[in-house]
Image (tube, rainbow, N blue to C red):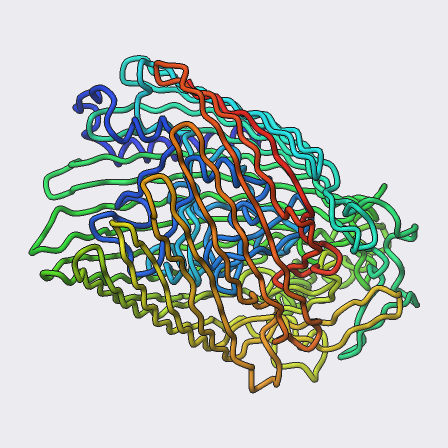
Amino acid sequence: MNHTSANQFKSKISLLSMASVMVFPAAAMAQVAPGESEETERNRRGEIVVTARSLSSPDMPTATPVQVLSGDELAHRRQGGLGETLAGLPGVHLDNFGGGASRPVIRGQTVPRIEILSDGANLFDVSSVSPDHAITTDPLLLDGIEVLRGPAAARYGGNAMNGAINLIDSKVPKTLPEGGFSGATEVRFGTGDEEKTLVGRVTAGVGPFAVHAEGSRRRSENYNVSKAFGSGELRDSFADSSSYSFGASWITSKGYIGAAYTRQDSEYGLPGHSHINGVCHTHGTDLHCAAHDEFDDPFGSSDNHTAYIKLRSERVDVRGDYDDLLPGLAHARVRLSYTDYKHDEIDGPALFSQYSNKVYDARVELTHAPLLGFTGTLGAQYTHGTFNGINKNDVHKGLPTSTAGFLQIPPDYVTESIGVFLSERRSFGAIDVEIAARKDWRDTDIPFTPWVISSPLLQSVIDAFEARNGAGSFRRRAEEGYRTVNPLSKHNPFSASLAMTWRIGDGYSAALSLARTQRAPNVRELYAYGNNLATNSYEVGLSQTRRASSQFPLSTTDVMETAKAVNLTLRKTGGPLEFEVGLFYQDIEDYIFARHIETEIETGVPHHYLIYTAADAKFTGIDGQISYRFTPESRVIVFGDYVRASRIKSLDDNVPRMSPARLGARYEGNWGPLSADVEYSRTFGQSRIASYETKTDGYNMVSATLAYRFDVGLGKSVEFYARGTNLTNELAFSHTSFVKNQSPLRGRNLVFGMRHQF
């Protein structure tokens, strides 16, 4: 970061901090928090309390299913990526890309139709742009993960059309540690990929202030797969990552305000990656994968190099929660963040692609005291982001040259959005009612960047043109042509929901939710025009279709997905029998997906020609789990999920990469310091496929965990654990993955770990 950029960075962060202080003007008069509360004790044990300030409230739960993964279960299930960590939960599947990148799939959809949150604030990276891009979180440093299945757009925007995942951490302390000091360490070793992991965290309190530091280091080699794949390990599935964070808070009896800095570095392989199709280009509706004329091979080298991504993400968070700030104001919450993300994509000696995303985000929520029986939250959010990276696969060759001989600087995609939202809840006897709405205004601009004049001859041509047409005429003419292929986009999505929960009694409840959600297309869906080597495809965005061929649909940016959804959730809490089952139906108008045009096999590696298209689609499904506790020490859980997408009649095709059905059972036992579980699941085959997909066979998964905890007194403990996954070493492919055939799921893996809390 140069000196000017650093000063701008510091200036903007200072403004964010000042804004957060202005939101809490009364905090200076608050009293210091007293001794450890019940919540603090639970946090010390690694448990997460779901509160009204998270995705759900214990006294008035959401009308759609919410599952919380925390404590021992989270510690034992954690993997290097978020998708692998959550895979297997009801309604959650995996879009994997080797050992370094994995995205969760909720009810058949992944990002950008699910929102990833960091303690209630949006997480920013480039994972929604391509499946080989990792979600920038480290599960090893999380305290808990909340998974909401179903629409959450009325609070978090259109990207939460299918659900939201809230990542809970301690980098901004919310409570003072017991005795003024607490911490934890963990070491792990995995046999299936030679994983070596070290994790540590510490929190110290001085008066009303708490400081926190945490970090992790994880290194794994190529992971093992069944030899039925043709080899015993998956080449280029290695992953190497490190994360650290420093934070501090001022904590009072009514709340806290604090800030944290987080950095994550990662380097991971891209299994099955091939650059041989970098030569692919189009002639109208035809995809051609051979060099000729101006279409050459941008790599010009053998295709046996290791391809990998080298990632760096820096983030600054300012967080605050405060009760009874003003009369009539029950709670105030602020979330401010700045994200500076960058990664390089490297194939052997060639740096062929670079992505960056710099985002400022501010979110304020004000919850009013009960008024006429209603409790509600009014909020606003502002986001400004600058993204760069798509349509570039030849960075190693320098700036591309236009047909006129100018050097072209890759454009930035600048998005600015403003959102306001309101939710109100009230109980009418045994019926809880919630209404919510959100309105957003989002503009995406691609600022015109003048071409670099590469020779005096070109400059003389420009001078002659402007002598005839006036000063600045060349730039105006150039910008007109630029805007033709890089149009502005404006979207004003509106989402609303109505939910009713009937508390039947004895722990039983039934909830019905009706939601209308609008989602604006993301940058790739709008502006893609070129090869995506990660997915072996040539992609054309909604605004670029006529640029590719006059036979394609009209180019447009005026497209928004509009979903009408019905969700029914049945719950039973308390007693030996507990369950949560969700049934859902979605009718989506202008569902945006990559439509298949043709597949070219000239190079020997299939390459798909895809254009982003809007068509109507419908989804129906069920997911959930039922548990029965035979004794206080043991219980059995049966879980499963199923989603079906209707055939897209207008295109006579199916929606690609739909989650297959799954059914499983798990036994859990907890006998004081000793705990264990064993799980079996069957993921069924998927035969309802898009025209360019192949059927995927079903597979079985068996996993087990054994742990023993030693209490060493004074709130300190040491736990030793062993967890085995895919114990039968079955060859398994995830149908929801873009690269299922080149990236099978992990084979047999045993993880041995030790956790120490103090």
User: Which one is in front, 335 or 628?
Assistant: 628
Residue 725 occupies quadrant: top right
| Spot occupied by residue 34 in the image (x, y as percentages of width and height) | 20, 20
* Numbered marks: total: 0
Residue 652 versus residue 509: which sits nearer the camera? 509
Which quadrant is the C terminus positioned in? top left
- Asked whether, in this view, residue 128 is left or right of residue 285, the answer is left
Q: Position of residue 468 (x, y in %)?
A: 73, 66
Task: Point out the image quarter for the N terminus.
Answer: top right
In the figure, residue 687 lies in which quadrant?
bottom right
Measuring from the top left, give residue 60's x and y in whole percent: 22, 53
Q: Which one is in front, 377 or 387?
A: 377
For image coordinates 45% across by 75% down, the residue present is 588
The answer to whether any part of residue 730 appears in the image is yes
Q: Is residue 532 above or below residue 120?
A: below
Q: Position of residue 70 (x, y in %)?
A: 41, 39
Residue displayed at 28% across by 36% down: 321
Q: Residue furthest front?
A: 630
- Depth order, front residue of 549/180: 180
Asked if residue 12 can be seen in this view, the reply is no
Q: Residue at x 40, y 73 (%)?
A: 585
Left-right relation of 687 to 395: left
